[in-house]
Amino acid sequence: MGIFYVVMSNIKFKERSLQIRGRVKIETYKAGMVERVMPYLDMIREHRDAARGLSRSHKAFRSHHLDRIQELKILIDSIKRAHFRGTPALVNNLVMDSPNYGLDLIIQRLTGNNTYSLNLLWIELGTGTTAPTVNDTGLSTPSIRLPVSYQEDYGATDAIVQAYVADANLTNATYGEVGSFVDGNASIGTGQLFNHALISPTFAKVSGEDVTVEIDVSIMNS
């Protein structure tokens, strides 16, 4: 039996690298926006859960729920536009890169380790101004933990999570950092930090305004 060798010389392969990146956006609204929007966010969750529970053979019923979600999103956008004040922060985030945090949580799920859900459930704001590093396990000076109010699988490459905060539920202060957490509970610092961003310039919350904090995560081939 012969042995065959394949020799490849001067052949270059163009490799595609996988990149994960994202941004944090904070927007402010006249007080009252969150109170009006929250019932519709609850309806979106109900329709989304119902659609996920249907198989492809129930196409008509699934389409009904998806159409209703789009209608509710349009309604929410109209309410937000009517109350909108500004976007005081739009910054890049840093995804953590250490055991049991950030990128490692994705690797664990891919290899069958389901200790952590990989669901972004909480967003924290803090007053710290120290630049984040990939080894962070929490915010420098966390001040408040916010439950994620809205989640969206946007296309095939982007995840969007948002926290909606009424005026009375966010202390007037100057915030310099934000981060999202996988799992955990309502106690500050619990769960696994996924990303950490410096808010620069800092965000000064004032009376009479509601706030949304949005974290976008994009995973794509470059």
Image: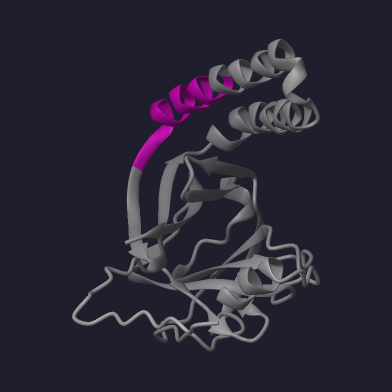
Q: Is 84 in front, or is 30?
A: 84
**Which portion, as a residue range, is magenta?**
72-85
* Image quadrant in which the N terminus is located: bottom right
Q: Quadrant of residue 201?
A: bottom left
Left or right, 220 with respect to 170, comes to left
Count of labels in the image = 0
Image height of 88 relative to 145, above or below: above
Q: At 41% across and 66% down in the image, what residue appears?
A: 18
Q: The C terminus lies in which quarter of the figure?
A: bottom left
Residue at image x 41%, y 48%? Answer: 27
- 147 above or below 55? below
**Left or right, 151 with reference to 197:** right
Closer-to-camera residue (122/8): 8
- Is residue 62 inside the magenta stretch? no
Colouring scheme applied when the structure was drawn: one colour
The prevailing secondary structure element of the residues shown in magenta is: helix
Tell me if 170 is positioned left or right of 212 in this view.
right
Which residue is outermost to the front? 1
Residue 59 x/y as whole percent: 70, 15
Residue 70, how many percent across, how many down? 54, 21
- Whether 83 is among the magenta residues is yes
Q: Give me the residue at 40% from left, 26% from top.
A: 82
Position of 204 with respect to 99 (left or right) is: left
Vertical side of 214 occupied by 83: above or below = above
